[in-house]
Every structure is written in C-alpha cells, then in structure tokens.
Image (cartoon, rainbow, N blue to C red):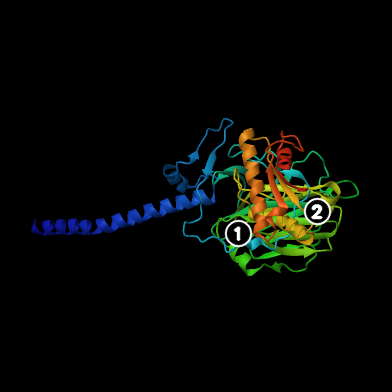
Amino acid sequence: MKQLFILAAFIISAVMICRPANAQFLKRIKNEVKTTAENHVVNDAGNVTDKAIDKTEDAAISSVQKKDDQGKQSAISTSAAPSPASTPPPPSGGITSYKNYDFVPGDKIIFESDLKDQKNAELPARLGILKGNAEVQSYRDKKILRMEKGGTVVIIPQMDTADYLPEQFTIAFDALIDGDNPNEFNTLAVNFFKPDKDNNYIAVNQGDYFFSLYEAELCHWGKTIDRQTLPETLEKSLLVPYTWHHYAIYVHKNVGKVYIDQYRVAASNMLPTGVTKMSINGSGHLGYFIKNIRIAGGGSDAYHKIMTEGKLITHGIHFAAGKSTILPESMGTINEVFDILKSHDELNLEIDGYTDSDGSDELNLKLSQQRADAVKAQLVSMGVNAVRLTAKGYGEAKPIAKNDTPVGKANNRRVEFVKD
C-alpha cells in the first residue's frame, strides 16, 4: 500500500512539473498559428483555401467576409498594410530624386484602368484575363488588381478596336510584389503583339521586343542578348517588401525606353515596328498587385505645340487623390516645361488646372486652383521667375471629352500650359 502511495505521488508530481512546459508549448503553438494566419491573409489575400490552418484563421480575421455558393463570391479586404511597421521606406521615390526624369506620357489617353467602383473578388471590367486568375481586391483602402501567385497570369486591355497601339505610344502602371521576399523566382513582363499575314495576332518574338523584370534584379528589353542589371539603389528599393513601384514605357517606331521609378533602366533603337496590342504578364512564386494602368498615344514637340497652338495639354502631372500633392512621376512633364522656359526667356505661361466631373463644382474648382498653384510653386522652386507664371483653376469646366467613361474622365483631368 505504501508503495502504491509513493508511486501515485510520483506521477502527480511529474504531471505538475510538466504542466507549465505543456502550457508554454501550447501557447507557442497558438502564437505561431496566429502569426501564420496573419501572414497568410496578407500574402494570400483573395484565396481562402481548404487547408487546415484556414479554420484557425477564420476565428482570428474579421476582415474575411464569406458568402454562400449560390452565385455569390467571397471577398477579403486587405486595407491594412502587410509590410512590417519596422520596414524602412525605399531609398528612392521623392520628387527631388526625379530631377532627371524624362518620361512624358502621350498626348491622348486611350486606355485607363479604373477599379474604384468594382466590388472585391470581381473580375476586372476593362481588363481581359488571357491566362491564370486575377481579381479586384482592396488594399490600403484602394482598389487594385490582384494577380495570383504560383503560376502565370496574363491580362490585356479590353478595347473597342482590334488595333489600338499607334506607332508612338506610352504605357504606365504601378506594381507591387505580393510577398515578403521580392527576389524569389518571379517575373513581371510587358509583351507586344502584331497581326500576321492572316490577321491573326501573335506575340512578337521575345528576343526582339518585350520588357521583363526578373527576380527584382535584372531586366530585358528589345534585342539585348543578356538581361541587364539594375542600378544598385533601385534594386535595393525593389527588395523592400510590399512597396509600390512605377513602371513606364515609351515607344516611337523602332525606338523604345523603359523606366522603373525615376530610373531609365533600358533603351533600344532596334525594336520591330507594327505592334498593335500589349499585355502585362506576371509569373513565378509570388503574385502581383497592379493599379493605374494607362496607355496614351502620340506625343509631339512641346515647344512647337505652345508656339503653334498657343497651349500644351498634358496628362503627365499626377496628384494624390483629392489633394494638390504632386506625385514624383509627374516630374517628366514638369522637367519638359521647365526646359522650355529655361531656353526661352521671352515666354510666359498660364498654368490651368482641370478636373473631371466627379464631386461638387465648388470642390473641383478649389482643387484645380490648388493643383495649378502647386505646379507653379514647383517650377518656381526649380528656378523659374514667378512673374513669368500665373495659375488658374477651372474645375470641371471646358471638358475635352465626355465624363461618362474612365478614359474620358482621365483625359479631362489635365494641366494646360497656355502661352500668355
């Protein structure tokens, strides 16, 4: 009996000793599951899988809204920034760092992606999906197109005409790599198409004409044999997780230039001519968020426009939504106007700001004046004498296109430089 008592006491003591360890072990598992759940929602927004861990996530994530299968869809809001709070900002990106930027978009906008009125988990209304899966999602309170990870996704503009790229055009968009390790095997590309003799559209040989960014460190453009390295500061910037970057392409006949942020990363004068369509391709382990896709045609000598037509209409000066803060990629157009003023001391300009018809007349008039003032202030800060410039806001007055389509609205949102 005494031996049984001793054995029982030993077992109870062992259990008591193990309880704290077990509690710590269970707590650690709980924390790891929670962390995994949070990371999974950030990195795989839009994909509610049937893995066991998702059952745990459902209890921890209130932003997931599930709907039944009777014609309804599931939507996940990713308005919270997924990048850690301690992540430093990219080493480039302010207006000052764009002082040598020379990308100027075309005169007339022919395609504009506008997702703000679409619901989460919907297919994009103006973008066709040739391959893979992509859908509209919310990210940091903005609507973006999410190209899923783990495969290849190809999207194309949905246009009314079969051939929409003229011989001179520009393409611009913003992209963010959906992952914590941006240089993991991943490729972002812009491809081009032209009709063959039977009027079938075929991709131009990739060795001749396409842009690709490979593992956030190398790029390819035109007939270059090998991938080109990127500037070191740009590469470091691309490796910062969950950071938007601005991509821009200029093409005129056989000449083409590619920009990422403020850097011109590639140029060629050996491009094949006759391309009429384009696509954006994302492939690899990680997916992409895409927004602000814009295609514009034309682009003539700015000084000639001012002198012969009395004004220069520009669509390359962009502002923060609802504000007069000039975005850095605007510096290509501003630099062009600055160079004209610097070379022609006799020239005075009125800077006219315009909006589309969204919002009230009063607010649009006020905003357009603030934006015209901001452009004037930027030119003055660069050395232009303030007496040579006046600024005036016209709001939604004097539209140059109908305000019933995204393209029309984009054309009406403009800054004009009028010979004074």
SS of the residue at dot 1? loop
Seen from the viewer's position, the closer of residues 262 and 47 is 262
Can residue 292 be seen?
yes
Toward the top, the furthest residue is: 70
Q: Quadrant of the N terminus?
A: bottom left
What residue is rendered at 59% in x and 37% in y? Answer: 119
Specify whether 115 is left or right of 222. left
Q: Nearer the viewer, residue 399 or 366?
A: 366
Q: Which mark is residue 302?
A: 2
Determine whether 53 is above or below 93 in the image.
Answer: above
Callout 1: 10 Å neighbours few (<14), some, many (20+)?
Answer: some
Identify the residue shown where x is 57% and y is 61%. 90
Depicted 239 relative to depicted 191: above or below: below
Q: Residue furthest left?
A: 2
Q: Residue at x 76, y 45 (%)?
A: 109
For the residues labelled 1 and 2, the Cα–Cα distance comes to: 25 Å
Q: Which circle's residue, 1 or 2, is located before the other in the chain?
A: 1
Image coordinates for residue 166, horizontal then vertical, percent: 84, 49
Marking on residue 94: 1
Disc assigned to residue 16: none
Task: Pick whichever, 355 or 233, lies toward us.
Answer: 355
Amino acid residing under circle 1: Gly
Circle 2: residue type: Ala
Q: Is residue 134 visible?
A: no
Instruction: Give neighbour class at mark 2: few <14, some 14-19, many 20+ (Cα, 10 Å).
Output: some
| Left or right side of 112 for 182 | left
Q: Looking at this view, is 212 or 369 the one in front?
A: 369
